[in-house]
Amino acid sequence: MYEFTSRVRYSEIKPDGKMSLTALITRMQDCSVFHSESIGRGPETWIAGGQGWMIISWQILIHSIPAFGVPITTKTWAYRFRGIEGDRNFTILDPEGNILAEANSRWIYFDLRAQKPMRVPEEEMNGFGSEEPLDSFVYSPRRIFLPKTEPVSYEPLRVQPMSIDTNGHVNNLAYIDMAIPYLPDSFHVKELRVQYNHQAHLKDLLIPKVYTAEDGICIALGLDTGEVCAIVQFL
């Protein structure tokens, strides 16, 4: 397990003084990277070796959003490795130990030079270890089925340099950032699920298609070739 504690920063809050959804999930991503770095397998190793982790799904439950200045503790741990995959849990806690948000995520180990998945190295599994998964978490399937309603298509979004990470493609959080503006102002996110299917790169055009259902909203972000890069579901 790895954890770090830091106050909610002014740069992380919305006009209402509460932490933004993207900032909350960024804490989780940062915690997983810090965990990798702590076992000697951080970004420098990924770049030098041409191998690293790519996330393929998020399921995040939001219980309460912290306000500016509140110290919050983010924790993460790996709980299962299978072939090319690894599963990881997260929690974000307030100073009293109450869970503000919790998450499950699935990752694949990737050969960045060959552009294909590879078996998780023994040193990676041994470094992280394997702990018990969150026992109170209601796990959803990785796959997200789009509603059968007709989507509304919007103007394509050009991928900007700020969205590209050290793997040379659009960072997983950038897709969430792209999807959030299509939510109604009154929408209160209790759960977020994301399925990643295909990489997008600098200057690609992503076409947002918004599906509305009784339980929430799905935004599919796909290339003009028809390949869907990510599906972001807000519940």
Image (spheres, helix red, strand yellow):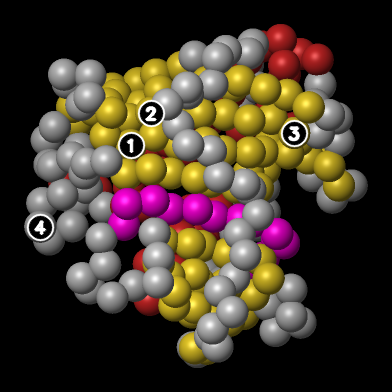
Task: Look at the numbered disc 1 and give the secondary structure of its residue.
Answer: strand
Of labels 2 and 4, earlier in sequence is 4
Q: Identify the image quadrant of residue 125.
A: top right
Of labels 3 and 4, earlier in sequence is 4
Q: Amino acid at mark 4?
A: Asp
Which circle marks residue 16 in the picture?
4
Q: Amino acid at mark 1?
A: Ala
Q: Residue at x 83, y 29 (%)?
A: 83
Give the extent of the magenta segment: 189-202
Q: In this rendering, would 213 be left or right of 64?
A: right
Dot in front, 2 or 4? 2
Which circle marks residue 91 in the picture?
2
Give 169 or 192, whichever is nearer the viewer: 192
The residue that mark 1 highlights is: 101
Q: In this rendering, would 35 be left or right of 11?
A: right
Of labels 2 and 3, earlier in sequence is 3
Relative to 208, say whether 171 is above or below: above
Q: Amino acid at mark 3?
A: Glu
Task: Look at the numbered disc 3 and give the secondary structure of its residue.
Answer: strand
Of labels 1 and 4, earlier in sequence is 4
- Separation (CA) of disc 1 from disc 2: 6 Å
Task: Look at the numbered disc 4 and give the secondary structure of its residue.
Answer: loop
Taking the image as drawn, is residue 203 in sight? no
